[in-house]
Structures are given as C-alpha cells and as structure tokens.
C-alpha cells in the first residue's frame, strides 16, 4: 500500500477511517501491523509500520520518519501543519463529515483544496 | 497543485552537508530570541547541518517567547509546540542562554565577532499607537500590555487595569483584538482552568465588564481576525453578539467570488449578523449577560476624559468612507463623528519590531529589518526569522515556515561558502567571557526546567497547568537554585 503524503492528519476521525479502509484487504490475513510508505516530493521514500487505528502523525513520530515541518500542535486540531489531501473518490468514502472547527483550521493550511 | 509547489520548495532546500565543511571549522551560529521563530530556525539548522552549533540567546530568563507570553491562555493546545522546542534545546549542539539582553549585555557587533552567522528572531516588542489626544490617560492600554498582563509577562505583571467599568472599546479587529475581548468576556470557571496568574484572575473575577466593542477603520470584508477566533466568540457561553444588520447586507453579494478562507469567514460573520440562530444558540444568546459588538468604518480621533480628567469616559470616533477596491480599499475620514461610551480602551492596531543595532537596515515604517527572503540586506551571514522580518502576521504555521526557510538558507550559505567558516570563532565561550566580566550569569535550559517544575507544581495545586512566576529576580533565583 502506498501513501503519497508528506503530511499528516488534521483529524483523528477521518484518519482512522482512512486507515480502516486501507487495512480491510489485509485484515482478512489477520495482520495486526500495516506497512505505510511516506514519500516526499523530492522522491525519498520511508516505509514504516503502524497498527490499525494509529494515526499518520503518531506513526511518523514513533518511527522517527524524516519529514519536515509537522505536528506543531501534536494532533490537537489547533494548527494545520499536518493535513491530508485525498483523491476525490477516497474523500467521498469518508462517512464522517468534517466539523466546522476542522474546516476553520484547514482554511489556514498551505495548498488548501476541497478534498 | 499549490501544496506540491509548497513542499517542493521546502524539499529542494534540504541540503546535505557538503564535504567542504569537514576541513573547515565547526560553524557557530547564534539565534537572538527563543520564541517559535528562533526555535524552528534552530531545529532546521541542527537537522540540515551535521556539525553546526547553535546558541539561542533570550532576554528573559525563560524560553519560548510568545508561545508562553502571547498565545491565549485558553488555547493551551497551541502551546504544544513547546515539547518540540524542548527536544531541540536538549540536543548537544544547542545551547539556551536566557537572561541575556542583546544590545546591552552583549552588543550585536560582539556577536558578529563570536559567530559565523546570526539569526535575528526577536519578534515585535512594541505596538503601534493611535497618536490621538488623551491616549496617555490611565484607561488607555495597549492590547499587547493587556495580553502580557494576563499571560504573566514580567514587564506587564503589575499593570494597573481598571475593570470596574461596564464598557470596553478595543481598537482593531485582528486576532489579538478578539483574544483580549474573549478573555474579558469568558466565564470565570473557564478562565480558572488556564495559566492566567492568580492576581489577574482575582481582578477578572471582580470585573464589571459587560460590553466589548471592537472598532475597525474599514468594513466587515476587511477584518483581520481568523475564523477560529470568530467562531469562539459566536459560541462563547454567557455572551451574545450584537451586530448591526445593515453593516453586513452587502457581504451576500461579495461572498460567492471570494477564495475559501475569506468566504467561510465572511459567511460566518454574515450568518451571525443576519440569520436567525439555531434554537440552542438562540436561547443561549437570549439569556446572556454580556455582549460583544463589532463597529466598522470608524477611526478614533480623541479619548474623552471623565470629570476627574484622569479616567476615560469615552472614545470619539470619526466616520470613514472607503475608497478603492479589493485589498487596496482604504478608509478616508469624514467630518462626521460619534462618541462611544467606555471606561477602558485597548489599542490593538498591530505590533512592531525595534532595532537591536544601528548598523542593521531597519525599516521604521513597517517595524521590520529589511531582508531578502530571510537574508538581511547588506549583512552577509545575518538572517531574520519570524515577525522581525515579516511583521506581525500569520499563525504559528507561518512562523514555522519562516524559521525553516531561514535555517535552510543559512545552511545553504555555509555549504556554498557564502558564509565563511574558514576561521575559528569563539562562540558562546567568547560571549560568556564578556558576560562574566559584567557579573552576568545566563539561565540555561536545565535552569529553566527547574523553574518549569516549580511553576507546574504550584499550578497543579491550583487546578491549572502552571502558575507563572512573574518577577524576574524570583524567576532567576528559582532557576539557579
């Protein structure tokens, strides 16, 4: 599985949903660990492991992944240094709507998109 | 697309250390200021250079600048970046030197001598004045001082704030203006859980303030605050908005064409002013005892004194009309005036930096040091990070980006030879030598840990994150204990 993201989740809720959806083909093999690949825009790849239900920020921190600039507020939804941009079709699969407070923070994010 | 560009710019600047440095001397870098602009720059330098040593100088005996003294006490999660700064400070190649004032204890030129490169990250220490008659009355304070007061900043800890007044005018409509309004209007049981000092809580507890009016010289489309802070005001318990519907009608036509952040902000503003609130909010507003108000197209022209000639009784405001379009819209004063009754005026029309040395290219109009993407003009090896270079704009994310950019720039300049590291520099040893001749002992990071522990222990007993020590000598004594 491949995750082309330099950044981390703004929202725990949407993230765990995201990981859930990623993990479903694996969970039938009863694998508790997931392999996550982070790729930076200069092409560096970091493949690390995380558990189902972890969020991407924790996985970055737990594995000391060498990314620039993330996690200023430590996942408390108080900044937007971490945020994800989904493909439209993945975004549409997230059932839980974004809260106003989450959207408020995203308004300040770099590279803001609708997804 | 924007995101891609943003990241590749960051990524492209990540340079590995060139082989040249192994034959050169260890680059010695100092940073003036230990707020986020300083710490994020330090973090970047340590990360992208394998040998550079970074010394962070701080005027106060405690680190973290505006994260400790500016971020609102009811936004504790924003202060979480302190944990990252603490990690940076614990690295072998990073040294924190608190209680050292650059300009008096050590001069800028002495730092130039002692270090290969300098990052100026000392932020904005002053604020803009209204320059109107009556501004010197005791009931006129700068929001900067007021923020310092409720955050336990030593220089403002004993500020005389008279909250025995019903109505407060805040001049300005940025996030600082909303922060001070919110602190004035938030229920005490919420404030007691924050790290607002006990003496300030006691004063807020006796506050008679019911109405806070935020005054802007332009229209609602020009407000500078961000949506998070506005939404907090809309939902503030025990408090209702009092907005004049007529001020917002034109927004409906303007909103559709705006980019998302501006659009959502003005939508919330227009909705709050014009629409019927949901039942729960409606009943909360109906029972509220306090009010916040926004007024537009007004410029303060005179502070009105009470009968005693000392206290404030009101603020005389000139009506403005707007000229021009879009971002270039400017307010032009008319002859028409009105008076706003108030007993306290907080001016919140912007912070500005001060020069640290006369040799630096300081722009007095903007209160910033002239720089080219972080490089100080005409001073090879001198950089700015954060508000001293950009002016007081943006949230912590902007300062993080500024710190990283300057840090990368500096490392790139070392690697390219632009910053000459061929000769050895004395670094902190040289500076400590200067300081010891003046009997000046810096506060180290482990000293700060002692004070931090002291403050959090007292705070725990009071049911709050910390109780700040606000007296400089006491801070030093506990730190050096």
Image: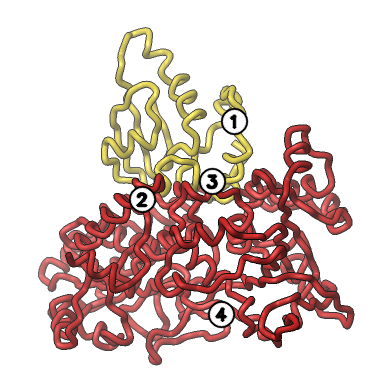
Chain colours: A yellow, B red
- Do the residues at discs 3 and 2 belong to one chain? yes
- Do the residues at discs 2 and 4 belong to one chain? yes
Check contact, mark 3 vs mark 2: CB within 8 A.
Answer: no
The mark nearer the N terminus, 2 or 4, is 4
Q: Nearer the viewer, mark 3 or mark 4?
A: 3
Residue B173 is situated, as x and y percent measured from the top left of the image, at 67, 64
Check contact, mark 2 vs mark 4: CB within 8 A.
Answer: no
Chain letter, disc 4 residue: B
Q: Is residue B225 left or right of residue B107?
A: right
Q: How far separated are the C-alphas under marks 3 and 4?
A: 37 Å
Residue B389 is situated, as x and y percent measured from the top left of the image, at 46, 74
Q: How far separated are the C-alphas under marks 1 and 3?
A: 40 Å
State which quadrant residue B287 falls in: top right
Q: How far separated are the C-alphas under marks 1 and 4?
A: 43 Å
Q: Nearer the viewer, residue B423 or A61?
A: A61
Q: Residue furthest bottom?
A: B358
Asked if B132 appears above or below B60 in the picture, the reply is below
Secondary structure beneath dot 1 equals helix
Residue that numbered label 3 is attached to: B190
Residue that numbered label 2 is attached to: B459
Residue drawn at x 86%, y 80% as measured from the top left: B334
Check contact, mark 1 vs mark 2: CB within 8 A.
Answer: no
How crowded pointer 2 is (Cα within 10 Å; few <14, some 14-19, many 20+) is rated as many
Chain letter, disc 1 residue: A
Q: How far separated are the C-alphas under marks 3 and 2?
A: 15 Å
The mark nearer the N terminus, 3 or 2, is 3
Q: How far separated are the C-alphas under marks 1 and 2?
A: 47 Å
The image quadrant where one finds the C terminus of chain B is bottom left
Q: How far separated are the C-alphas under marks 2 and 4?
A: 39 Å
Which of the numbered marks, if any, corresponds to residue B366?
Answer: 4
State which quadrant residue B67 falls in: bottom left
Residue that numbered label 1 is attached to: A88
């Amino acid at each position: 599985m491949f995750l082309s993201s330099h950044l981390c989740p703004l929202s725990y809720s949407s993230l765990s949903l995201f990981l859930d959806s990623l993990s479903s083909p694996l969970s039938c093999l009863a694998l508790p660990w997931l392999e996550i690949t982070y790729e930076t825009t200069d092409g560096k790849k970091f493949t690390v492991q995380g558990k189902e239900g972890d969020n991407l920020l924790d996985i970055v921190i737990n594995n000391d992944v060498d990314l620039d600039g993330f996690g200023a507020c430590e996942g408390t939804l108080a900044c937007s240094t971490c945020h994800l941009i989904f493909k439209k079709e993945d975004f549409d699969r997230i059932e839980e709507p974004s809260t106003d407070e989450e959207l408020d923070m995203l308004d300040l994010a770099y590279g803001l998109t609708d997804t | 697309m924007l995101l891609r560009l943003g990241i590749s710019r960051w990524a492209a600047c990540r340079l590995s250390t060139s082989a040249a440095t192994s034959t050169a001397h260890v680059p010695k870098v100092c940073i003036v200021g230990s707020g986020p602009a300083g710490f994020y720059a330090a973090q970047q330098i340590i990360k992208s250079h394998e040998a550079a040593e970074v010394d962070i100088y701080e005027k106060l005996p405690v680190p973290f600048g505006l994260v400790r003294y500016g971020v609102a006490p009811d936004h504790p999660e924003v202060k979480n970046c302190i944990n990252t700064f603490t990690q940076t400070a614990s690295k072998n190649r990073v040294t924190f030197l608190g209680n050292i004032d650059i300009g008096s204890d050590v001069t800028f030129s002495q730092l130039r001598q002692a270090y290969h490169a300098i990052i100026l990250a000392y932020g904005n220490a002053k604020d803009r004045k209204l320059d109107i008659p009556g501004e010197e009355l005791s009931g006129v304070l700068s929001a900067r001082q007021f923020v310092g007061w409720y955050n336990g900043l030593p220089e403002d800890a004993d500020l005389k704030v008279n909250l025995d007044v019903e109505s407060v005018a805040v001049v300005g409509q940025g996030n600082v203006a909303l922060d001070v309004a919110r602190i004035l209007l938030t229920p005490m049981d919420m404030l007691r859980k924050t790290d607002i000092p006990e003496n300030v809580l006691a004063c807020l507890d006796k506050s008679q303030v019911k109405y806070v009016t935020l005054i802007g010289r332009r229209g609602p489309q020009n407000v500078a605050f961000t949506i998070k802070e506005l939404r907090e005001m809309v939902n503030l318990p025990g408090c209702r908005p009092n907005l004049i519907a007529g001020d917002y009608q034109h927004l409906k036509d303007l909103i559709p064409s705006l980019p998302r952040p501006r659009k959502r902000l003005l939508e919330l503003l227009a909705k709050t002013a014009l629409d019927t609130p949901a039942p729960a909010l409606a009943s909360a507003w109906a029972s509220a005892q306090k009010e916040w108000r926004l007024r537009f197209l007004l410029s303060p022209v005179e502070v009105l004194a009470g009968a005693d000639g000392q206290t404030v009784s009101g603020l005389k405001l000139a009506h403005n009309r707007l000229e021009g379009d879009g971002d270039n819209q400017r307010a032009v004063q008319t002859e028409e005036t009105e008076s706003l009754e108030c007993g306290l005026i907080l001016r919140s029309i912007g912070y500005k930096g001060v020069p640290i040395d006369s040799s630096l290219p300081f722009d007095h109009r903007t209160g910033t040091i002239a720089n080219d993407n972080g490089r100080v003009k005409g001073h090879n090896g001198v950089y700015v990070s954060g508000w001293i270079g950009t002016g007081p704009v943006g949230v912590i994310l902007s300062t993080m980006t500024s710190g990283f950019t300057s840090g990368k720039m500096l490392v790139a300049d070392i690697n390219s030879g632009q910053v000459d590291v061929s000769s050895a520099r004395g670094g902190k040893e040289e500076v400590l030598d200067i300081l010891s001749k003046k009997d000046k002992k810096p506060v180290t990071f482990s000293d700060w840990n002692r004070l931090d522990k002291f403050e959090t222990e007292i705070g725990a007993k009071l049911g709050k994150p910390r109780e700040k020590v606000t007296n400089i000598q006491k801070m030093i004594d506990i730190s050096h204990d």
